[in-house]
């Protein structure tokens, strides 16, 4: 068979349309469905735990970064002003407390999460919630 040049076609769709496509993929429960659900969870549209990931054959693919996926799983639990205790978050997600602490501290170190000094619970850093926050400029990439 001769090599064909594939033409890329870009189709603009709304966020609602994209969400319906994601929901259809997730509804089929095929390989990779939990990874799609993780993307939805980051936007606050779904919830999943470690069991969901472990039951997905795509998650066990050695070429994927499980560390990144678990880190995003933890981050997906945070929306708005919700605060989480380590024990509750670990239980909810099905991850050990030690692992949960490690990831939470990493997100705090890069400024995405913060720990409330009075309650010791974790939350999204205030600077990410404040719409008037003066965001630093993105670095310029050179090629």
Image: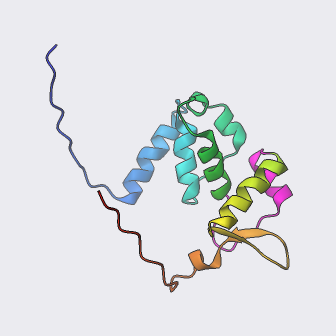
Q: Residue furthest top?
A: 1
Q: Residue 36 at x, y = what percent?
A: 51, 44
Q: Quadrant of the N terminus?
A: top left
Q: Residue 102 at x, y = what percent?
A: 76, 54
- The image quarter containing residue 105 is bottom right
What residue sits 40% from the left and 69% below the top?
139
- The image quarter containing residue 79 is bottom right
Q: Is residue 115 left or right of residue 66?
A: right
Q: Which residues are magenta?
A: 77-95
Q: Is residue 117 magenta?
A: no
Q: Residue furthest front?
A: 143
Can you say whether 24 is above or below 138 in the image? above
Q: Residue 82 at x, y = what percent?
A: 71, 70
What residue sits 85% from the left and 75% below the top?
119
Q: Is residue 124 left or right of residue 18?
A: right
From this viewpoint, is residue 64 visible?
A: yes
């Amino acid at each position: 068979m001769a090599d064909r040049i594939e033409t890329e076609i870009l189709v603009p769709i709304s966020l609602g349309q994209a969400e319906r496509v994601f929901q259809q993929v997730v509804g089929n429960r095929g390989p990779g469905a939990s990874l799609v659900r993780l993307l939805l969870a980051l936007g606050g549209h779904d919830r999943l735990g470690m069991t969901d990931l472990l039951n997905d054959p795509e998650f066990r693919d050695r070429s994927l970064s499980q560390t990144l996926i678990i880190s995003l799983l933890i981050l997906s639990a945070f929306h708005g002003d919700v605060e989480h205790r380590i024990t509750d978050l670990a239980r909810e997600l099905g991850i050990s407390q030690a692992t949960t602490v490690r990831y939470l501290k990493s997100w705090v170190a890069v400024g995405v999460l913060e720990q409330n000094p009075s309650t010791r619970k974790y939350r999204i850093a205030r600077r990410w919630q404040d719409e008037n926050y003066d965001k630093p400029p993105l670095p310029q990439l050179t090629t």
